[in-house]
Amino acid sequence: ETDAYHSGPGHYEVIGTDADRVVDNVNKDGVTDEHTVSGKFTFTEADYGYDKPNAVKPFFWEKPEAGAYKTWGAENSAEPVDIRWVVDNTPGQATLTGFDAKRHVVIQFVATYPDADGDGTADTPIPTGYTVTQYLPVVHPDDAGYNDVNMPVKFGIMDGDGDSATATLNVTI
């Protein structure tokens, strides 16, 4: 039995009891929990060609279409609210984060970078993988029975003179 409040991106603290809740993720239709998946990117420095990776934006996430996805939010609101997206394409720490109306993190896409010496600084501006963490529920279609939310998220790489190529990471919730 737990009840929780949000104390930062993806962080929750237990403050009481409630048999119908899980500490970090509650939805209108039942109990769910935070979930993380990860994968690998297969591009290398050779994919950037002779121009090498762009110094300012060698890898980037693109925001999904505004209003395309909704959440019940951390407060379990009566009506679903749009997920609002924020992109941080800083080299070595690119993130795409979806928030509810009160700025609680719903879902976050993080590019992962090699850090051989463990100093917290990326060894290269080229990510080798990604993680996707869902912290709060995403509203599913109102069809009868089990259904999925397909969330295609675009990402790309950019070379030194600004040429870019994009691809899609298909996430099913």
Image: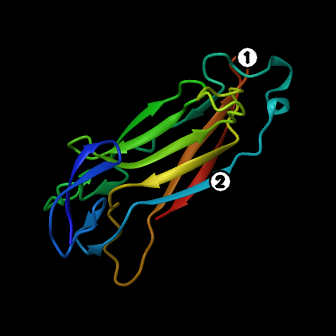
- Residue under label 2: 39
Q: Position of residue 62 (x, y in %)?
A: 52, 37
**Is tag 1's residue or tag 2's residue first in the polypeptide sequence?**
2
Model colouring: rainbow
- Residue under label 1: 160
* Image: 140 above or below 62: below
* Residue located 35% across and 60% down the image: 138
**Residue 54 in which image quadrant:** top right
* Image: 118 above or below 97: above
Q: Please state which amino acid type lies under the numbered disc 1.
A: Gly
Residue 41 appears left or right of 66:
right
Q: Residue furthest bottom?
A: 145
Residue 41 appears left or right of 91:
right
Distance in Å between CA atoms under marks 1 and 2? 26 Å
Q: Position of residue 173 (x, y in %)?
A: 46, 65
Q: Say what secondary structure mark 2 lies in.
A: strand
Q: Please state which amino acid type lies under the numbered disc 2.
A: Gly
Residue 161 appears left or right of 11:
right
Question: Quick one: quadrant of the N terminus?
Answer: bottom left
- Mark 1 is surrounded, within 10 Å at the Cα level, by few (under 14), some (14 to 19) or many (20 or more) other residues, namely some
Residue 104 appears left or right of 156:
left
* Residue located 21% across and 66% down the image: 2
Q: Position of residue 110 (x, y in %)?
A: 53, 42
* Residue located 65% across and 53% down the image: 39
